[in-house]
């Protein structure tokens, strides 16, 4: 029963049936030859060497060269850690591919979008995008098209260097920019350092043309653009412990929702502590 349970857990963690069977019996038997492992695990002899090579490449077992070679398990903690690392890498690769295909899809589908429609399509209240390259590209577009105002809510504004050019252009166009950051006293040392670097960057580039304030708790992060006109907003809620690349952001162009988010921003702004600029 224990062997079956371990095998099933390994399959839940991403291994196929042959990989899970082989690894389960290596964990059980210790150092073992491929021929012996094939007999006890049920992995066909024609597949066993390929399966063992895969387990070695994934860092789940070790191999001792010889005639014949023998295979040994890593301890359960190392196996679990390696599986988690492999899973994260695969998720990142999958996400990167999706973002790449999504960009190509958007460019390709513009030529056919609604060309055959017989009635006007109502835009959805929210459009969900992944956090990362896609949300950054959407943020750049929002900064580029801003006409009157940009409102930013962020913990440390960690993505500032990646949108700096678009933000700078907006300020030069006369767009009003206000930024609410998390109170530095609520940040860990590394996050506080990043926030300080970004504050110095903004102060050097924008001076008093950009206003910054601090607040001790931020219910969401994102930006709101031109809430009094044809505005838009991009936001994501706080999810402590969830890696950024697994999170999603929402984009809306619905006037009432953009306006509601801007009112929330104004309430936080009024209760926020102004940033004390460094003396020249």
Image (cartoon, rainbow, N blue to C red):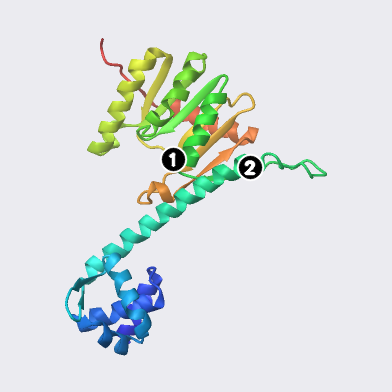
The residue drawn where x is 31% and y is 79% is 22
**Identity of the residue furthest to the front in this view:** 67
Relative depth, front residue between 23 and 240 = 23
Is residue 125 something one can see in this rendering? no
Residue 75 place in picture, x, y as percent = 20, 71
Residue 82 place in picture, x, y as percent = 28, 63
Instruction: Assign a secondary structure to mark 1.
Output: loop
The residue drawn where x is 55% and y is 34% is 233
The residue drawn where x is 49% and y is 39% is 135
Instruction: Assign a secondary structure to mark 2.
Output: helix
Relative depth, front residue between 263 and 187 = 187
- Tell me: residue 246, above or below residue 182: below
Mark drawn on residue 108? 2
**Identity of the residue furthest to the top in this view:** 280
Q: Earlier in the sequence, mark 1 or mark 2?
A: 2
Q: Which residue is mark 1?
A: 219
Residue 121 place in picture, x, y as percent = 74, 42
- Tell me: residue 91, above or below residue 275: below
Is residue 72 something one can see in this rendering? yes
The residue drawn where x is 51% and y is 26% is 143
Q: Are marks 1 and 2 in contact (CB under 8 Å)?
A: no
Q: Estimate the spatial distance between the alpha carbons at disc 1 and disc 2, rounded to whole Å.
A: 37 Å
């Amino acid at each position: 029963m224990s062997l079956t349970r371990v095998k099933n857990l390994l399959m839940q963690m991403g291994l196929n049936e042959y990989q899970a069977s082989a690894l389960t019996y290596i964990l059980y038997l210790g150092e073992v030859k491929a021929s012996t492992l094939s007999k006890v695990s049920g992995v066909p002899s024609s597949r066993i060497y390929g399966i063992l090579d895969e387990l070695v490449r994934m860092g789940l077992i070790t191999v001792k060269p010889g005639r014949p070679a023998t295979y040994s398990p890593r301890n359960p903690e190392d196996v679990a850690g390696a599986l988690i690392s492999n899973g994260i890498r695969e998720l990142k690769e999958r996400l990167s591919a999706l973002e790449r295909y999504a960009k190509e899809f958007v460019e390709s589908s513009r030529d056919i979008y609604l060309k055959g429609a017989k009635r006007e399509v109502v835009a959805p209240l929210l459009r969900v995008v992944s956090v990362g390259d896609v949300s950054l590209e959407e943020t750049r577009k929002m900064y580029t098209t801003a006409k009157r105002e940009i409102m930013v809510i962020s913990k440390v504004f960690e993505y500032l260097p990646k949108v700096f050019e678009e933000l700078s252009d907006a300020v030069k166009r006369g767009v009003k920019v206000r930024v609410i950051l998390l109170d530095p006293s609520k940040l860990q040392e590394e996050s506080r350092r990043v926030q300080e670097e970004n504050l110095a960057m903004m102060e050097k580039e924008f001076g008093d043309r950009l206003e910054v304030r601090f607040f001790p708790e931020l219910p969401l992060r994102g930006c709101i653009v031109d809430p009094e006109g044809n505005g838009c907003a991009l936001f994501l809620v706080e999810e402590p412990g969830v890696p950024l690349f697994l999170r999603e952001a929402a984009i809306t162009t619905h006037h009432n929702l953009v306006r509601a988010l801007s009112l929330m921003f104004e309430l936080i702004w009024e209760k926020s502590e102004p940033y004390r600029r460094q003396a020249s």
